[in-house]
Amino acid sequence: MRVAVVGAGYVGLVTAACLAELGHDVTAVEQDRRKLQLLEARTCPIHEELLPGLMEKHWGKTLYFTASLQDAMQQAQVVFICVATPASHNGSTDLSCLDAVVREISKLLQHKVLLVEKSTVPVRTCDAIRQTLISGGAHPEQFAVACNPEFLREGTAVVDFLVPDRIVIGTDDEFSREILRDLYSPLTSGQYYKHPESVAGGGARRPQLIDTSVRSAELIKHAANAFLAMKIAFINGVANLAEAYRADIDDVCHGLGADRRIGPHFLRAGLGFGGACLPKDVRAFAAMAQQSDYSFPLLAATTKMNQRQRLLFARKVQKALGSVRGRQIACLGVAFKAGTDDVRNSPAIDIIKQLVSRGARISAFDPAASQKASQELAGLGVSFEVDPYQAMDGADALVILTEWPEFGSLDLARVRGLLQRPLIVDGRNMYSPETMRKAGFSYWSCGREPVLSQPVTARRSAGDPPTLLSMIPSLESVSVTQRTGGP
Ligand code: UGA
């Protein structure tokens, strides 16, 4: 099938390369000259596993790049719209790029085309696209509009596209439904997975096809991201309680996730969610609810808890060190998660800023995101080192901020030798407390009791959790109130 993809950003580029991999003839349109030059030179402009290989495989055969929407649309049956939908000042979605593209498309329609919305947009955006096309002069017979939301995670986007749990197609007419079913049939029939060269290596479960209306598809995308965000905020709340009550969050997650109604995924406690999607989408979903006069307080609470998690972690570093003023702190990781060079809304960046504002000096290392982070942190005196050991040389503490796998297999004897004192504060729970105890470190992590290389004093301080004995009076007072105040 001939496909045009408008916008070769993160979602557009992955979509274009993966559709080429499925045997379609794809032209991606990119207006940014610098990015287009890279693409024309076969260079992948983003850090994304497997994407350079796919680009190399299909470039110039079934995958093309151009600046001209008109050229790309000439014979296309389907046009995927993958332009940015950033947040506006009040948290709602800024649809101006999308609007501009749709206006342009309305002038270029020559044969019937299916326009597919892939960016994350408020419910009813596809209705607005139809209206814009008509007011731009397009005839309703010349187009159809569908929604096919993406569920791509940065770092694993190619696998997420080609080996998904489900493919959601939101259509309101047979023309659109048939085209989208056809387009994805190599995946839904299982045909693609039979190729030994497929990214699944010749074996994967066929994805479920969720065939629904346009509006339901738009809502599925928002609900999915909000639910994932809520799950993370929730588990971090539980982790904070686990710390206060000296339980172990790993065991709690195990016990919680074994219930199939809950599931074990997205229950990693730590610094909370960051990135270009979850924080923005939760706020946009809340704004959407507000516009429909429905208050959805869970969403605002999710955002608030997530922000607070970063603050609590910075305080934890401060508590572990006594004071951070004048201390040198080695920070491992600045990307918002492992597998990407993206630092947008990264918890690591926020935490480094907080530590600097409290007087700390930071030496940092990230295997992919140092360059982007150095722009974000310009003027704060943060030094970026070429390997993790150089960052920690002479530091007062080591702080782990991104879950890059290599940070979980450091040479601990070497780390001990380089640090001024054996102190690690781990925002991603990369080590077991037992390993750290044996290696002689003080080790603070999330939702687990800290390992202190100095023995803790037995005396109970104000911040310690209440004992069962100290709770008994309050339980009594509850039952008294119930007895006297009840009906
Ligand atoms: C997210 C969704 O997972 C995708 O399904 C969606 O398509 C995408 O947004 C989007 O809307 O474009 P992404 O932002 O790439 O993908 O990253 P995630 O893997 O979801 O991680 C988001 C954040 O949550 C990261 O900061 C990560 O460290 C954090 N996280 C994730 C946790 O703190 N705990 C977990 O258990 C999982």
Image (tube, rainbow, N blue to C red):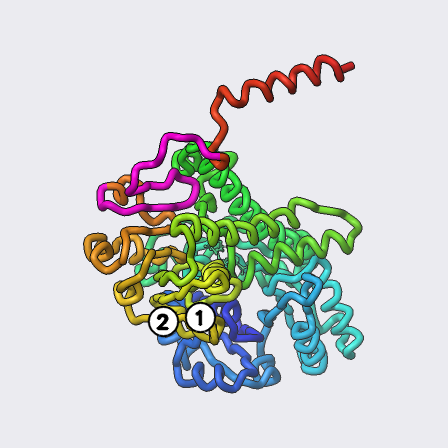
* Residue closer to the observer: 294 or 414: 414
User: Is disc 2 placed on a helix, strand or loop?
Assistant: strand
| Residue 237 horizontal/vertical position (percent) | 53, 41
| Residue 185 horizontal/vertical position (percent) | 49, 58
Residue at x 51% of width, y 78% of height = 27
User: Is disc 1 placed on a helix, strand or loop?
Assistant: helix
**With 244 as the anchor, is 217 left or right in this view?**
right
Q: Which mark is residue 113?
A: none
Residue at the spot of label 2: 384
- In the rendered image, is residue 87 in sight? yes
How packed is label 2: few (under 14 Cα within 10 Å), some, or many (20 or more)? many
* Residue closer to the observer: 293 or 420: 420
Q: Any magenta on residue 457?
A: yes
**With 432 as the anchor, is 258 left or right in this view?**
right
Q: Is mark 1 within 8 Å of ligand 1?
A: no
Splitting the image into 4 quarters, where does residue 214 fall?
Answer: bottom right
Q: Which mark is residue 373?
A: 1
- The quarter in which the C terminus is drawn is top right
Splitting the image into 4 quarters, where does residue 334 fall?
Answer: bottom left
| Residue 330 horizontal/vertical position (percent) | 35, 61
Please give the range of residues in magenta. Answer: 438-461
Secondary structure character of the magenta stretch overall: loop
Residue at x 33% of width, y 41% of height = 451
Q: Residue 237, relative to residue 114: is it above or below? A: above
